[in-house]
Structure formats: C-alpha cells, structure tokens
Image (cartoon, grey):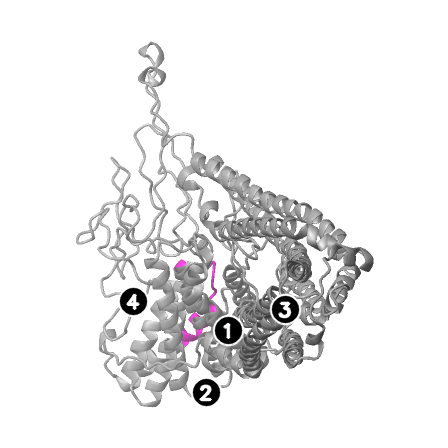
Amino acid sequence: MATFISVQSKKASEVDLAKPLCKFIQQTYPAGEAQAEHCRAAEELHKLRKSAVGRPLDKHESSLETLMRYYDQLCSIEPKFPFSENQICVTFTWKDAFDKGSLFGGSVKLALASLGYEKTCVLFNCGALASQIASEQNLDNDEGLKTAAKHYQFASGAFQHIKDTVLSALSREPTVDISPDTVGTLSLIMLAQAQEVFFLKATRDKMKDAIIAKLANQAADYYGDAFKQCQYKDTLPKYFYFQEVFPVLAAKHCIMQANAEYHQSILAKQQKKFGEEIGRLQHASDLVKTVASRYDEYINVKDLSDKINRALTAAKKDNDFIYHDRVPDLKDLEPIGKASLVKTTSIVVPISQKFTDLFEKMVPLAVQQSLGLYNQRKADLVNRSIAQMREATNLANGILASLNLPAAIEDVSGDSVPQSILQKSKSVIEQGGIQTIDQLIKDLPELLQRNREILDESLRLLDEEEATDNDLRTKFKERWQRTPSGELYRPLRAEGANFCNILDKAVQADGQVKERYQTHRDTISLLCKPETELNAAIPSANPAKTMQGSEVVRVLRALLVSLDEVKKEREQLENDLKSVNFDMTSKFLTALAQDGAINEEAISVTELDRIYGSLTHKVQETLKKQDDLLKNIQNAHQEFSKMKQSNNESNLREEVLKNLAVANDNFVELVANLKEGTKFYNELTEILLKFQNKCSDIVFARKTERDELLKDLQQSIAREPSAPSIPSQPAYQTAAGGGSKPAASPIPTPAPRTMVSSKPQPPARPPPPVISPASTIPTPVSAATGVTASPAGSTAVGTAPSQAQGPPYPTYPGYPGYCQMPMPLGYNPYSYGQYNLPYAPQMYQNPGQAPYPGPQQPGYPYPQQPYYPQQ
C-alpha cells in the first residue's frame, strides 16, 4: 500500500556565471582587494552551480543541502547584480522535467536571461529532490516517518511558492512543468502524502481509532482534491496521465477512505453500534474492491482487503446471531471528522541552515545606485565651489593685469624688468614654455580619434546584431518570440548618443583653446625669453622718483598682499574640498533595512550639508573678501594714476607690461585646460572601453540566445506534419482489378484518447452484462452482430456524462467533495477490467474484416484486454 509519488528533477544547460559577474565587478568597483575578493566569490558561485545543477544528484540530504545553498545564494545576489538582457545578460536554459522528447528533436526547453527563472527552476529541483528523498525513507521506523513527512511538506511549500511567483518571475510563458496548474497540483499531492505519513505513524503508534480515522479521512480529502485537479486541468503534463500519477491518486483516495471507514467501524463497535460497524466495513470493502479491480498493478491492497473482510465477516456473524442491529444505509451514516497535521513549509530565505553569503561585503544594487547618485551630487557641489573660486581668481588676475599691477608700483626705475614679470617668466620657462603647449595640442587629436573609433565600433556591433534580429523576425514572424533588439538596445543607444554629444562638445572646447593660444602665442613666447632679451623688448620710461615712498604705493602694496593671501586660501580650500571622503554605504544600508527603500535625495542633501557646510561657507567668505579688496585696489590705483607722470613712453611701457602679465595668466590657464582635456580623453577612453565591453557582452549573449532559438525552431519545424491531413485514396487505386476481387476493407481507426470533459469523447463501448447475485450466466450475445445485448434499464450506448468524472468511489450524501451523479455504465472507463468481466469485450469491426487487437487507450490506467474472436 505504501506507494508514493516522487517528482523528476529538471535538467539545466551549462552556464559560465564567473565571467560576466567578474566583468561587471571590474567595471563597477575600483581595482583593489575588494574587487579581487568579489571576483573570487563569483568563481565560487560558478562552482556551486556546477555542484547543484550540473550533475545528477544522489537522493540524499547532503545533495538537497547543496541545492538549497545555491538557491539561497541566488536570492542573495539578486539585489546586488543587475541581471537583465541589457546589463548582465546570462541566458539560463532548462528542460521540461516531464517531457521525454520526440523522434525528431530533444525535449522541450526554455532559455531566458532572467535570474528569476533560474531561481524558479532551482526551487523546483529542491522540491523534486525532497520528494525523492522522502519516497526512499524506511517507513517502518519513527525516524523514517519523520524525515518523509518533513520533506513532503517542504516539497509542497516549494511547489506552492513557485505557483505564487512564477508568472511574475518570468517574462514569457513557462514550460508545462513549472506552470501554476502543474506546481499547484504537485503541492497538493505532496501535502496528501505527508498527511498519509502521519496516518501511518499514528497507526504504528496505536493511537485511538477516532484520531486515526480523522487522519485517514483528511488524507483521502487531500488525495481527492489532487485527483480533481488532474481531471479539470487540461494543461497538466501528459506524464500525469500516461504514468502512475493519475491512477495512484484515485487509488490512494479510495484506500485512505477505506482506512477511515475501517477505524471508524472499530469506534462504532466500541460504542455498541453494530449496525453502523457493518455499514462502514461494507463501504470500506467496496472501496478496496474498486482499487483491486482497477489499480492492482499500481498498488497492492491484499493485506488491507483481508483485514477488512475478516472484520466484516466477524461483525456480520455477531450481528446475525447476537445483536440483530439494523444496518443503516450509507447515506445515513454520520460523516467522519477530519484532522490535518500537515501544512506547506513556507519558503523563507535562507532555506539552508549552512548558508553563507559569498558576496556578504557587496552592497545591494539599490545601495550602489544610491551611492552613484550621492557621488554625483557630491561632485556637483565640489565642482561648483571650485569653479566659483577659480572664476573669482581669474577675475582678480584680469583686473590686476588691466591695471598693470603689481608691475606698475614695482617699475619705478623705468629701465629694468619688474620683479613680478621676472617671476612670471621664470615660472613659464620652468613649465616648458611654448613647447609644452604645442605638445599638448598635438596630442589632443590622437586621443580624440581613439575615442571615436571605440565608440563607432561599439555602435557597429549593436547595428549588425539588430539587423540580423530584424531579418530573422521578418523570416519567422510570430515564431521569433524574443525581445526585439531595437527595444533592448534603447538604453545603450541613448548612452552612445550621450558619448557622441560629449565628444562633440569636447571638440568645440579644443577649438576655443587653440584659438586663444594663437591670439597670445607671441606674448607667451616673449615671456619665455631670457631676462636680457625680455628687458630689451620692454620700452623704457622715466617715472617720477618721488612716487617710490608715497602713501598710495604703500596702500596698493598692502592691498595686493591681502589679495595674494585670499588666493592662497582658495588653493587650500580647493584641496580640502577634493580631499573630503565620507562613505555613505552604512547610511543607505540602514535606510534600506528600516524602510525597505532608500530616499537618496533627502539623505544625500542632509549629509552633504553636514560634511561640506563649513567649507562652502568659507568659499563664500573668500568671494566677498575679494570683492572688497578689488574695490579698494581700483580706488587706490586711480589716485596712483593721477600722481604718475603721463607720457607716451610710459604708456607704451605700461601696455607691454600688461600684455606680459596677461600672457602669463593665459599660459597658466591654457596648460591647465590642455592637461584637463588630456585627462578627460584618457578617462573617457576607459569609460568607452567599458561601454564597448557591455555592447560586446550583450551582443554575444544575444547571438547565443539566437542560436538556441534557431535550434528549437528547426526541431519544431521538423516535428510538424508536412500537410494538415493525408488525402484520401483515389477510387481507381482501391477498385478491384477486373471486377472479380472484392474491395479491400478500410483500415480500422483506433478510438481517440479518452480525456476529461473539454476533450473529444471516444466511441461508445458496448454496455457490460448485468450480473445478478444469484446467477453468473453471461448475457446472450447476438449472433448477427456479435454485440452483447443491453440489459433493460441500462444507460444508452455512447451517452457521455454531463460533467467531469470524479474519483471512482461509491457516493452518498454527507461526504464533501464526492461526485453526486453516478457515472453511466456505458461510458465509465473504470467499469471494465480483467477482474470483473466474465469474458473479454468485443470490438466493432466491418463485415469481412479480419479481427485485430484493440488499440491501447492512453487515458486508461489499466492494461488493455486482449481480443478473443468468437467461434
């Protein structure tokens, strides 16, 4: 009797997880120990997958532990890696667990670039392996019973979890084995088997008969629900009907109901209800006979049948000779109660007790995204503050150059180079002078061209793959069921367009720098000459000697010193702004743990104000201080200009000194701009290389997916018939030659497969003979037709039931879930069997046709009876 259903595992194709994950890690995280550790974890994950799904697993708890650890790891990495078709594109391919394939191709399989699909299939295998382990347990001891019950309940929970989540986890229609109908039915079956295990344990522990009866009745109810699922769901795998699932469920329903009636009869006997005892034992006997006649090849009920028959014989004997209690009708018996001791195990991650997160130090993807946005806000704030200070410095330098300060107050002799000009000249020469700028300008086009080529190659890869996808979509039309490349590449093309725009703006900026360089090149060249040549190039003048010690000159010098101090303070502030580093990971992780989401903007603004508030305040103070100093310098310079002797020579000399000061400022700015441009192009090269790798990876993944889909389509096309139907033979091919030979008999067509209500019904069988209790003489057979005559009152031949058939048990009111309408004998597929027919049924045949064996009906869970021709 202890026959249990186990589920077959799905088979997966090999996938390299380490390579795409390592690429993402190298592109996302800076080089260092953390990056290397994450890459090692990716390698360990790949090894774990090979151990979990890359080989057949033993029916042992250690194998189940490996599967559960891999499932937990998938759940752990899901929020940390962006698995999708346009980011980390890994295609997972799994075969249908119940499909055995065909002559022209392999079994049905589905390939998706979805981590949710991988999780679903792995959890299915967890449930399948748990059912296999449970079915291997020795149910003759308590340890085996406990282990079996635990694993059946876990399997039920795994299948129920898939039923609840599979449609949201997949972007396409799932294969039949993981469809909601299939896994829902499997969950019911596993729950029923767990309840049966508890019934067996209660029987083994010799618990009270009232409790055992309720446990058995609940198990019968679960089996009945699973049986009805198989009847009403025409989307279930064919495996359920062609293998032992369907008949075992029907048999188990009857067996558990028979056990419930048997133990309830014992309780009735204890309560002196001898008539009820006999009624229940008779019902139990009928149920066991049903199983023995129809499902004997699947389940042996001889022991249970003998036990019930012995009890029934003894009860009848005692009642006939002693008690004379009236035996009530079946419908008058009180319903047996139910007691459920099982429930589906909820799938709560981690499901493995030995799970350790390989990527424990890696933050979730939501935190990574928040960190990226925070870093962008931080960079904007720092760059804005630095830009304000640099603009203020450039403004101050421009004003001083226009006033020829500090050269004007230093040039009191009129015939030597001012000290400030000498310092500027020395600084320019130390930085390489005009040759430095020429070399930097020469390098820019090469860097630009390199970036252009990388970007063009990346977009070319996308264009070629999209063109191929469009051609195949045009060729196969609705058969080509995958995301169009045009839709999939939209984010990448938007990113590529952004890079093109950045390069165009960079080219414009390079042009402006070159134009400014050509304007000031001669003056910068003059500034690079030795002191003697520089002095000779500056016109001489004879300003008033009395201005050397004037109050105006002293005030101007003091103001210029203060302005230099402001500039130095800005340089320090710029370094401070760049050097501040604060890790926001803990803040975002805390917010994610508390709220389940991250309000990045509110958190980032608050923290940036706390970290950079004092520095930005100092920046604003330097700007205000410079404004005040520049106003005082301009006022003091006006007084200085009035006191200064004005002549053509002095004006010409002052103009040259101004140009030299401006040339120095332009040199410094040009070198800084060109170095920033070089750095920009080099950094952009790294970004574009990552973009190219991303494009290359997704194109490779799409090609792999395309090859798999093409292979499946070829197999599907090969399995399709060449024509909808075979044309009928012409009359001249079937006509007898010369008119002397009789026409050949038509080829007999087997009856179609018997299915549930929505499927075509088979031709009617002859009704069975009515066997009276007093006689076993068979009903006469018509000699003319060879068909058994229908008894009076029998159901008309070929009449189908008006609703789907329920489990084959006797029905009476008071038992919930029983089919109230009896099945017509002329249609009932369970009414004919080798154990209850006095002779083999006859098959219809045309006159003159040779006898042939009847076709095996796939919908019948018993062997087809051989054909014996009438003599």
**Residue 597 in view, yes or no:** no
Which circle's residue, 3 or 1, is located before the other in the chain? Answer: 3
Q: Residue furthest top?
A: 738
The residue tagged 4 is 810
Label 4 Cα crowd, 10 Å radius (few <14 / some 14-19 / many 20+):
some
Task: Please provide the residue range marked out in magenta.
Answer: 294-310
The residue tagged 2 is 207
**Numbered disc 1: secondary structure:** helix
Q: At which x and y percent is residue 117?
A: 50, 59
| Amino acid marked by disc 2 | Met
The residue tagged 1 is 154
Marks 4 and 3 sit apart, C-alpha to C-alpha, by 46 Å
Q: Quadrant of residue 219?
A: bottom left
Marks 3 and 1 sit apart, C-alpha to C-alpha, by 15 Å
| Amino acid marked by disc 1 | Phe
Which circle's residue, 3 or 2, is located before the other in the chain? Answer: 3
Q: Viewer-proximal residue, 313 or 608?
A: 608
**Residue 307 placement, left or right of 357:** left
